[in-house]
Image (cartoon, coloured by chain):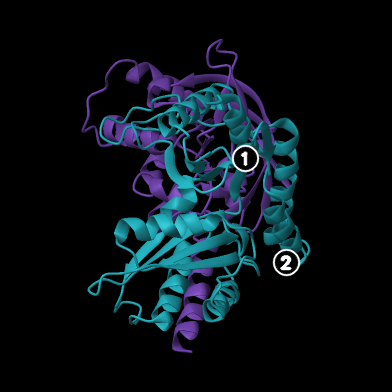
Chain colours: A purple, B cyan
Amino acid sequence: MKQITTPISDEVIRDLKVGDAVALSGMMVTGRDAVHKWIMETFIKKTRPPQGDDLQVYEELKKILYGSIIYHCGPVVTGLDTKDYKIIAAGPTTSIREEPYQADVMKHFNLKGVIGKGGMGPKTLKGCQETPAVYFHAIGGAASFLAQTVTKVHGVFKLDFGVPEAIWVIEVKEFPVVVTMDAHGASQHAVIDESSKKVLEDLMSR
Amino acid sequence: MRDLTNEILELIRRTSSSLPPDVEKRLRESIEKEEPGSTARGALETILKNIDLSRANSTPICQDTGTPIFYVHYPVGVSTIKLKEQIRSAMAEATKRSFMRPNAVDAIYDNNTGNNLGGDDFPYVHFEEVEGDDLTIELMLKGGGCENVGRQYSLPDNSVGAGRDLAGVRKVVLDAVQKAQGQGCAPGILGVAIGGDRGSSYIKSKEVLFSEMGTRNEDPKIAELEERLTSEANELGIGPMGFGGKTTVLDTKIIGLSRLPASYFVSVSYMCWAYRRRKLTVKGEEVIYD
């Protein structure tokens, strides 16, 4: 298993290929539907003017995300009253919903990867080649197990998005993932989609 | 009437953190079918570790604690108004204790209520009066990932070449599994309703998921179709998480309903491997958890 710590260099990313098992460590943030839409509209397409603490949060994010990772995750968090946050369940959410935004967001922040489940589409695959970055697949539903790799919650932004959609800034140690989309245009998901489609055609003709 | 709020809270804790034994057994059996050292096998091994951990610590098996679906079978004379209040109180408390993730988001105004209570519809509670003295409360948690890959077909469906018969049902169910890929957290369990209107069809396709793994439809012809669908879905080779592998679907359950002459719906509800459903029974003074 390859041990990789954020921030990650381009070389390390280009060295990875589909099928590689990786143990990730270091700082990263969670971000899903609300966050990707917010970033796209406020800072990339600029169809929405920054409001409230948007600009402050953005400046912080730029620093944290450079060379780092967004984890598609809506965790279960204790300590909401005391702000002594602890993550007790943190498996991945289905990434494909972020397909309209992902490539642009990766390039904008110089992300080196996204973690999620179920893979992403051709636009993101192209983004992986260009940024460069990879798609790290985590085990869906292994929430308690993965929460144990979160050693610290450094803070949270955009809690007004709700706990699942907020930007949780976390530090992880040996978070296990598998590369299923690499920086060279290979995607495990495209392969399985093709092969299963062929089997389906055969089954339909029986 | 007895206040069952604490007992319902315990039901919620169990459902969220302790995977039912019939599901765990099937998952353990599937590990052996995958190649040693394969990503598919690794995924199942991690899943089993997670199941042990969440049970031991009372933490959610999956962070998406899903839509809470309560089915209450109550004897004559029990107040459903009071029971619903107790269920809602228990749900808010369970969310406070982090057995559940706050999951009720207002669809128009985009705000998460923070306590898993959303209007009249969240949590979903189905009441049915029954003969006898026992009160049973069943809870199913169905996450968003698998919910999103469910499909409802209206037959005939020309895109798949499915006519209005069981042969057509078979085709659309297989189509739904292929389209789902690994995104419903395969290996999945299929709940299939044939008939109904669009609403009842989907509801029944989820209701049928309350039964034990391996429960077959009473009609042997339908039971055969259930087994055939499971085995053919596995031929697709999607595997755990869509990593490629031998186990894509663990079980298929079919229920037949009435339909309008003009309509022929087939609803496929895809349940993820984290197939969470638990039951409590009140027998006199005793409360029994499954």
Q: Picture coordinates of residue B56 (x, y %)?
A: 76, 34
Q: Earlier in the sequence, mark 2 or mark 1?
A: 2
Q: Is residue A23 above or below residue B185?
A: above
In the image, what residue type sits under mark 1?
Leu
Image point (41%, 73%), residue name? B172
Chain letter for mark 2, please.
B
Q: Is residue B184 above or below residue B159?
A: above
Image point (25%, 37%), residue name? A45
Image point (22%, 24%), residue name? A49
Q: Can residue A196 be seen from the camera position used here? A: yes
Q: Is residue B223 above or below residue B248?
A: below
In the image, what residue type sits under mark 2?
Glu
Chain letter for mark 1, please.
B
Residue tagged 1 = B280
Distance, label 2 to label 1, CA atoms, is 35 Å
* Image quadrant containing the C terminus of chain B: top right
Residue tagged 2 = B34
Image quarter for residue B4? top right
Q: Nearer the viewer, residue A153 or B215?
A: B215
Q: Picture coordinates of residue B114 (x, y %)?
A: 43, 24
Label 2 element class: loop
